[in-house]
Image (spheres, coloured by chain):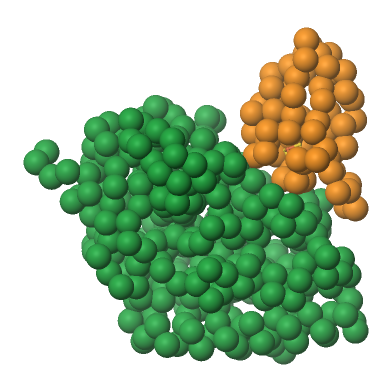
Chain colours: A orange, B green
Amino acid sequence: MKITVDFDHCEVHGDCVVAAPEVFDIGDDDDVVQVLDDNPGEELRTKVETAAKMCPVAAIKLGA
Amino acid sequence: MTLTASELGVLSTDTYAQGDPTTFGLPLDHFDYIRDNEPCFMQEFNDPMLIEKAWVVSRNEDIWEVDRNQQRYAADRGYVNMWKVTPIDPTMGGQPAMLTSDGERHRAQRQVMSKGFTPKVVAKLEEKFREYAVTIIDEALDKREFNFVQDIGHAMPMEALGDVLGVPPGDRAKFFSWVDTFAAPFDTRITPSFDYVMEAIGNLMVYSTELAEAKRQNPGDDVMSRIVAAGADAMSEDEIMGNVALLASGAAESTRTAMSHGMHEMMRNPTQMKWLRERQSDIPSSAIQEIVRIASPFTHLVRTATEDHVLQGQEISEGDIVLMLFVAGNFDPRAFDNPREFDLSREKNPHVSFGRGPHQCLGKHVASLEMKVLFEELLQRTKDIQPNGDIEYVRDAYSRGVYNLPVTLTPA
Ligand code: HEM
Ligand code: SF4
């Protein structure tokens, strides 16, 4: 599944990191979230969907 | 039910001051009634210290929607809660803060401050928090009988706030005394009159400018140092004052309140206490989130509608105030299984105590860690904790503080 993050909106809330640490990370000096894997396998779909739902500014979009 | 929603007093001080301890101190039946029958109703306040009126939104899902839709529900058009005057409302003589900014201004401030709050930074605070907890519990064990709110709930959130912000040890006593007056500006047992609050705000504003200057000279690893390092584009002098006032009013009392309601519920539910004692070496996050849910330390916050629209059948006009009644949303059966049950293992917990939108609590990882560490130390070093009198609530309809929670400890 393809992931896109709208970096203009991301405010490093970190909810996505908590929901899907395999896919998202925030380093100490990051201004926006880092996408570790923008095309993760299907086994991570539930986690990534949770991340997208939790993101307070709805910055995460999922493709097929 | 013969009363209409606006007559039920879901935003009256008396409702919370005289809450029923067997229902978390909350009017749960009234919350059910408004969610079922008038999920968006007009509340008038009729008090010179309070806003005139607001649309009250009480369903969990609607609160998520209002909180997340900052285009439609603005935070930067005045007012924070039901109080007419707050130190962070620039339209009423205060200074702008994150919570009263939107869009670019919000993002700029939040990005600077959030670096002091990432999960990794917070994890580093754990060691210090544990030292505080050990000292607090040592003193409590000497006393055996005391008011949990004062003797256990007070110190940890205050010191934690001092650490996060970078308040030097020598300044902490005066800093804490200002913070205390914000806890309950209208409860005369705590704050004799509103003049004390105004004076404390003034002192705090002056102090925040001094602290900023001190950090420019001598930067550390704290939030204030990050703010001054980021420069005036990221945060103006006014915004620095506003954000210090925001932290002073939002960080300490809320955490103490959550701990106190949590302790009270555990004493009422021996099975839950036992469940937690079995996990006392590493308290799971579900337990902390459940405590934060039932505590709902801030009953509500408000936004201003930016356009005419319809919400739950009501015609909202641009400029109307929309009030998110978090505490009602936290007991909504549409969102929670058995919402009236205190369940420390609750899995699905979409509570709104920290908010859910762009303004979602920046300190939630800090607050959660404080509670985790404090309860771990408390449970590990006691065999039993029992009530030693009745719980008494703070007289306030915004901040759900506990005034007195008498307990007796039996050491392990
Ligand atoms: C259990 C304790 C706490 C509760 C219940 C709580 C609750 C809240 C709520 C409801 C909001 C507004 C959310 C919204 O409008 O969507 C908020 C915002 C905020 N909180 Fe907390 N808070 C707690 C502890 C803390 C702590 C410990 C800190 C800092 C050390 C903190 C710092 C902040 C800041 C800076 C904001 C403004 C964020 C923004 O506007 O972007 N809070 N908090
Ligand atoms: S949850 Fe949203 S805002 Fe937060 S870091 Fe992830 S993408 Fe960014």
The vertical placement of B77 against B333, above or below, is: below
| Relative to B58, B22 lies left or right | left
Kindly indicate the quadrant of the structure image that contains residue A34: top right
The vertical placement of B404 against B296, above or below, is: below
Q: How many marks?
A: 0
Kindly indicate the quadrant of the structure image that contains residue B13: bottom left
Residue at 22 percent of width and 49 percent of height:
B6
Q: Quadrant of the N terminus of chain B?
A: top left
Residue B215: image x %, image y %?
Answer: 84, 80
Residue B147: image x %, image y %?
Answer: 41, 73
Residue B271: image x %, image y %?
Answer: 41, 41
The extreme left residue here reads B2
Q: From where the camera sits, is residue B281 visible? A: no
B86 or B291, which is in the foreground? B86
Q: Quadrant of the C terminus of chain B?
A: bottom right
Residue A17: image x %, image y %?
Answer: 77, 37
Figure quadrant, ligand 2: top right
Residue at 45 percent of width and 46 percent of height:
B318
The vertical placement of B40 against A30, above or below, is: above
B305 or B252, which is in the foreground? B305
Residue at 70 percent of width and 70 percent of height:
B239
Q: From where the camera sits, is residue B250 visible? A: yes
| Relative to B258, A21 lies left or right | right
| Relative to A17, B400 lies left or right | left
Residue at 58 percent of width and 57 percent of height:
B76
B237 or B258, which is in the foreground? B237
